[in-house]
């Protein structure tokens, strides 16, 4: 029995390490009137305050539904709005694979900023 538990834990750790970056999405398409997706170069000369890292995760509990980066981005936007951010920079989405209890998942992260 202990051998099966070890094998299961080893398999889970191996799968967890399989996260891969998703092809860059046109993040700017997800900008809203209240929150803009910036490239770092766009605000390098602007006065802004970092509000911290925000994350959005789309989790599929079954193999029949594929986790989507669009859903993860919407959740990221909601988290940034909670911080009263006016924008986000350094946005990246990864296919995070198996993430208990998810059968598959996508995680998007960004730095929330307040641009003056």
Image: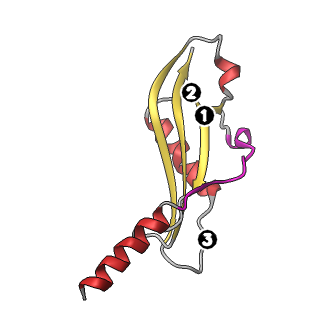
Q: Which residue is mark 3?
A: 66
Q: Name the colouring of the figure.
A: secondary structure
- At mark 2, the secondary structure is loop
Given this view, does label 3 or label 2 mark the residue nearer the observer? 3
- At mark 1, the secondary structure is strand
Given this view, does label 1 or label 3 mark the residue nearer the observer? 1
Q: Quadrant of the N terminus?
A: bottom left
Q: Which residue is mark 2?
A: 86
In the visual, does 105 lie left or right of 69?
left
Q: Residue at horizontal 46%, vertical 69%?
A: 102
Q: Which residue is mark 1?
A: 90
Please give the range of residues in magenta: 18-30
Q: Residue 52's image quarter?
A: top left
CA distance separating discs 3 and 2: 30 Å
Q: Residues within 10 Å of mark 3 (few under 14, many from 20)?
A: some
In the visual, does 45 lie left or right of 2?
right
Q: Earlier in the sequence, mark 1 or mark 3?
A: 3
CA distance separating discs 1 and 3: 25 Å
Q: Is residue 109 above or below residue 3?
A: above
CA distance separating discs 2 and 1: 14 Å
């Amino acid at each position: 029995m202990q051998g099966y538990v070890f094998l299961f834990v080893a398999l889970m750790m191996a799968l967890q390490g399989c996260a891969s970056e998703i092809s860059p999405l046109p993040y700017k398409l997800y900008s809203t009137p209240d929150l803009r997706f910036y490239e770092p170069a766009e605000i390098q000369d602007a006065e802004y305050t970092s509000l911290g890292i925000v994350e959005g995760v789309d989790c599929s509990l079954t193999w029949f539904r594929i986790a989507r980066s669009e859903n993860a981005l919407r959740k990221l936007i909601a988290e940034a709005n909670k911080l009263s951010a006016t924008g986000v920079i350094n946005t990246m989405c990864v296919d995070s694979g198996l993430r208990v209890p998810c059968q598959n998942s996508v995680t998007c992260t960004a730095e929330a900023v307040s641009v003056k």
